Image: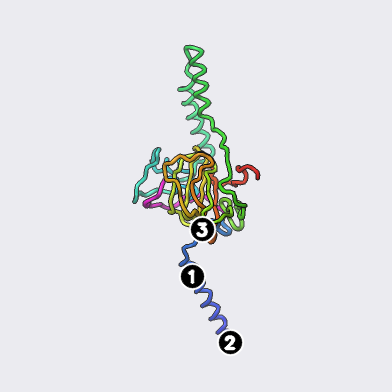
């Protein structure tokens, strides 16, 4: 066989492999050689099932910042066909500090008016304490062993994968409100996103069956889904924690086994 024929045959095989990959519906959550970073260009057109939380999750954005930049207020209601702008510059630390300082000053003016009685003083202090961030008690979302760890480099993984058989229970890792339950995010399969407070969200992907719907409140330890392989090559639970829209290592938050 001549050299030219060998080269031609190699090119044909390579092209066929590219076509096969482009037609595959499987898109793993782990992106090779690409560290996850916020998408700040383009427009997202809302489709049925989208929520502000799932859109922010898709583009690695803080849901509050994304909503605010599009003029959408809490409870962040959106509708199919709505255009969500992504090309908004990230708030700098200086801008954020200035904004927070102004907000804190305004809050202090409202909260710390000179009380008329001692009882009022106690009430004001208690009211102020409610605004402090309460620590979240994280628990393991499944009993299986860790088969993939969080990684920002190389074979990037935005969370951890836990082994499990199809139908095994998936639990809420902490108490919070279900803000997404569906299969609209490519690579996640049947997905649940829970909002724990204004800072933390958690996600549970590749489920066989979803047992909670958007708007439900899930206490820590509640069974919310069953392990499956939707959007994945095997049965497993992909678990993520996001802090202000950015993926963080779940093993830094979950208790040691």
Q: Which residue is mark 3?
A: 229
**Structural crowding at the residue carrying mark 3, measured as other residues with C-alpha within 10 Å and reported as few (<14), some (14–19) or many (≥20):** many
Residue 149 to residue 104: above or below: below
**Structural crowding at the residue carrying mark 1, measured as other residues with C-alpha within 10 Å and reported as few (<14), some (14–19) or many (≥20):** few
Q: Main secondary structure of the magenta part?
A: loop
Q: Give the percent coordinates (x, y) of residue 140.
A: 58, 45
Which label belongs to residue 44?
none
User: Nearer the N terminus, badge 3 or badge 1?
Assistant: 1
How far apart, in angstroms, are the residues tagged by discs 3 and 1? 21 Å
**Structural crowding at the residue carrying mark 2, measured as other residues with C-alpha within 10 Å and reported as few (<14), some (14–19) or many (≥20):** few
Residue 244 to residue 104: above or below: below
Residue 185 lies in the magenta stretch = no
Q: Which residue is mark 2?
A: 2
User: Nearer the N terminus, badge 3 or badge 2?
Assistant: 2
Q: Which residue is mark 1?
A: 20
Q: Give the percent coordinates (x, y) of residue 216.
A: 43, 41
Name the residue rendered at 59%, 49% in the picture. 143
Closer to us: mark 3 or mark 1? 3
Q: Which residues are magenta?
A: 35-51
Q: Give the percent coordinates (x, y) of residue 6.
A: 57, 82
């Amino acid at each position: 066989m001549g050299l030219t024929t060998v080269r031609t045959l190699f090119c044909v095989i390579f092209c066929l492999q590219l076509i096969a990959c482009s037609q595959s519906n499987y898109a793993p959550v782990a992106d090779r050689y690409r560290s996850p970073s916020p998408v700040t260009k383009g427009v997202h057109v809302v489709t049925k099932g989208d929520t502000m939380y799932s859109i922010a999750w898709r583009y690695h954005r803080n849901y509050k910042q994304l909503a605010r930049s599009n003029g959408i207020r809490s409870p962040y209601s959106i509708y199919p066909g709505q255009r969500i702008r992504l090309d908004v510059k990230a708030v700098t630390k200086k801008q954020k500090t200035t904004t927070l300082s102004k907000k804190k000053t305004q809050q202090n003016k409202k909260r710390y008016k000179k009380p008329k009685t001692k009882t009022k003083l106690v009430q004001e202090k208690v009211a102020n304490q409610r605004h402090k961030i309460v620590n979240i008690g994280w628990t393991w979302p499944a009993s299986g062993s860790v088969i993939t760890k969080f990684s920002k480099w190389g074979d990037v993984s935005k969370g951890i994968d836990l082994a499990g058989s199809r139908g095994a229970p998936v639990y809420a890792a902490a108490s919070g409100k279900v803000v997404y339950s569906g299969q609209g995010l490519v690579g996640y399969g049947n997905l649940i996103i829970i909002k724990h407070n204004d800072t933390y969200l958690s996600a549970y992907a590749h489920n066989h069956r979803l047992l909670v719907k958007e708007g439900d409140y899930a206490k820590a330890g509640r069974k919310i889904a069953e392990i499956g392989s939707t959007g994945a090559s095997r049965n497993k639970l992909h678990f993520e924690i996001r802090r202000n829209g950015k993926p963080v290592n779940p093993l830094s938050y979950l208790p040691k086994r």
